[in-house]
Image (cartoon, helix red, strand yellow):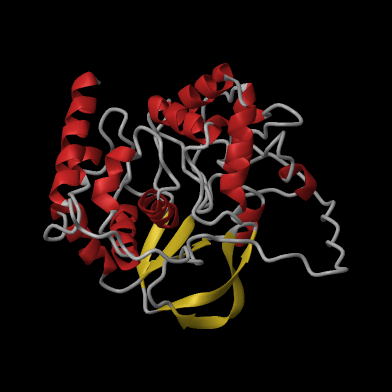
Amino acid sequence: MRSILTRTVVLAVAASATLAGQAPAPAGSPPPWAYTVNPPPTPGATPAPADPEPKQVPGSTVSLTTSQTRDAFNPPDWHPAAHPPMPDAVAHGRRPAMRACGFCHLANGQGRPENASLAGLPAAYIIQQMADFKNGERKSAEPRMGPPNAMIQDAKAATDDEIKTAAAYFSSFPYKKWVRVVESKDVPKTRIAGSMHVPTNDGSEPLGPRIIEVPEDLARTELRDAASGFVAYVPPGSIARGEALVKTGGGGKTVACTACHGAELKGLGPVPPLAGRSPSYTVRQIYDIQQGVRKGPWSALMKGAVEKLTVDDMIAIAAYTASREP
């Protein structure tokens, strides 16, 4: 592991030297399509009561009510045989301060576009990110976005043992293909609900320079079914453009991602894998590092590689990395 870390530092220093003197991308508002902020509640509106009837999902014999699937301290586990036994930090958290890791990231760690997929990440990487959240070194460029704020709260409440146990759990099994990437000029119209894009079933609109990630099956996603993934619509040609940036650095615009994240983008030692993971999440992390709100000892290794990237570059990189097999 020491040799891999040393190599990573050397590459990162080289990246910073290569890009020295280049101005960072112009600062501006975070791209709203990536930073999904829930709309404010309608004044005077009363939330509809949850359907009391038990629900089921394909491939599972478990039966749960909608209310049960919304319990952040006892998240649904529709497929208990599909992963190792969950430790308490993942299965229940600790009332009242720390929600169960499995609520947002799902019991199998596959995650959702508004948060990270933890399955298959190096345990050391997860532990460091929790420390960064806890110490104020990792924030979001969009302070109104709920999930990063929830992570800060949970990280501050978590004990070292809880963090180590959860990290060991999520790193013990592989991430599975979860996002279907589609190049398209048009995309279904969506609204933001639950910090993610939800189809409105009101036709389509031009995609433009965005990535729009939606559930493959909204009903299953709302029930937090950890076997139902997502489709990401990306601009035409973005995968090929991203490949050039990822593999060669795009003619000096950045540094080849493969140098540190591996030839197949499956990670090297404590350096996290990128292949097949949410492109929306990837864009947010690149942007956060570029803007200096995601820091910490390992984020510094990325600073030189991302400082010249435009949002269009980030879209291309994320489209390509998401399209790869994990």
Q: Position of residue 120 (x, y in %)?
A: 40, 33
Image quarter of the N terminus: top left
Q: Position of residue 106 (x, y in %)?
A: 57, 40
Residue in front for this viewpoint, 7 or 114: 7
Q: Position of residue 219 (x, y in %)?
A: 64, 59
Residue at image point 40% right, 48% down: 292
When the figure is inspected, residue 153 is found, relative to residue 115, above or below; the finding is above
- Count of numbered tags: 0
Residue at image point 63% right, 40% down: 103
Residue in front for this viewpoint, 65 or 255: 255
Residue at image point 52% right, 50% down: 112
Name the residue furthest front: 21
When the figure is inspected, residue 326 is found, relative to residue 160, above or below; the finding is below
Residue 58 appears in the picture as rendered: no
Residue in front for this viewpoint, 5 or 289: 289
Residue 143 appears in the picture as rendered: yes
Residue at image point 44% right, 57% down: 280
Name the residue furthest top: 161
Q: Position of residue 213 (x, y in %)?
A: 48, 62
196 to the left or right of 208: right
* Quarter holding residue 180: bottom left
Image quarter of the C terminus: top left
212 to the left or right of 220: left
* Quarter holding residue 322: bottom left
* Quarter holding residue 297: top left
71 to the left or right of 230: right
